[in-house]
Amino acid sequence: MENNQLKHQLYIVIFGTHTRAGRIFDIALIIAILLSLTVLILHSIEGLATEWDDVFQKLEYLFTALFTVEYLLRLYCSPKPRAYASSFYGVVDLLSILPTYLALLFPSASFMGVIRLLRVMRIFRILKLVRYLQDSNILLRSLLMSRRKIFVFFSTVAILVTIFGALIYVIEGPENGFTSIPQSIYWAIVTITTVGYGDLVPSTPLGKAIASLTMLLGYSILAVPTGIITAELSQEINTHRNLVKCPNCSKTGHESDALHCKHCGSELAAPDERVVIETKAD
């Protein structure tokens, strides 16, 4: 019985944000994450790494030990440990401590600790900004809905850069730096995206003509994925508005943060309450 009570208390503090202890725990956790990232960044600077290497190593081991204990406590007090371990935050929590242990075998893996930055996303729950996460879900769903169109778009672009790469390879040749078709495709990608590194430049009149056509085509192509995602985003926002229904006239089309019905003026459910209902449904 005491064991179950201890688990429940730990669960409220570690997973909850509605208590003072829970908020203090999460704020302390974010401070620790930011401090560990600061140590990681400073350790990557050659001058500081040489002078303070031992200090940085000890701090890294200290933070890793703290995050390991925190991860084990989450598994211990979670009602469904497997569900937590396989969730987004559970995977991120695990990945944030693995690099230090892997670094004992592979030293370069220590800099994978920047994954800890993802854990700062917990600040959305602390500050009760769940509505912003709901907005990010709208954007995510828009991207998922447009994935087929974007795939077709990228397939078309891949074909175009292959064609232009092959043409510029035939026209310019190795003597002008276009030593292979893959190298020429790289030039076509850089040109069609209007990046233009300048490491490969056509020198023949026909090659310059192909380059000009590629650059003009690039400006046209860049607008395509923006239009696709914008259309899906607009549709998703309209769908989301229809979820907010007036309890009096049953009409939809309200903004997610609306307080009163725009048709009859009746009071709507509070935005925070609507977010809680949607979150529980998920």
Image (cartoon, helix red, strand yellow):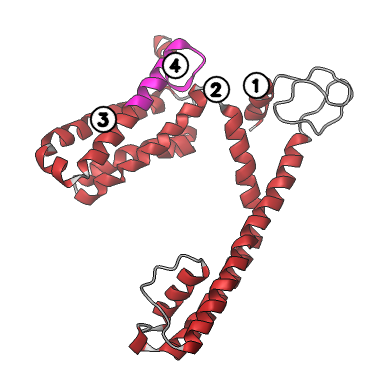
Q: What distance separates the C-alpha of mark 3 from that of mark 4? A: 20 Å
Q: Is residue 236 above or below residue 225?
A: above
List x then y, in percent, for residue 13: 43, 16
Q: Magenta stretch mostly in which secondary structure?
A: helix
The residue shown at (50%, 88%) is 206
Q: Which mark is residue 272?
A: 1
Q: What distance separates the C-alpha of mark 2 from that of mark 1? A: 9 Å
Q: Quadrant of the N terminus?
A: top left
Identify which amino acid the numbered label 3 is placed on: Phe
Q: Is residue 202 visible?
A: yes
Query: Which element carries disc 4, helix, strand or loop?
Result: helix
Q: Which quadrant of the view contains residue 30?
A: top left
Marks 4 and 1: which is nearer the front?
1
List x then y, in percent, for residue 273: 67, 20
Magenta region: 12-31
Q: Earlier in the sequence, mark 1 or mark 3?
A: 3
Q: Are marks 2 and 1 in contact (CB under 8 Å)?
A: yes
Q: Earlier in the sequence, mark 2 or mark 3?
A: 3
Q: Which residue is mark 2?
A: 128
Q: What distance separates the C-alpha of mark 2 from that of mark 3? A: 26 Å
Q: Earlier in the sequence, mark 4 or mark 1?
A: 4
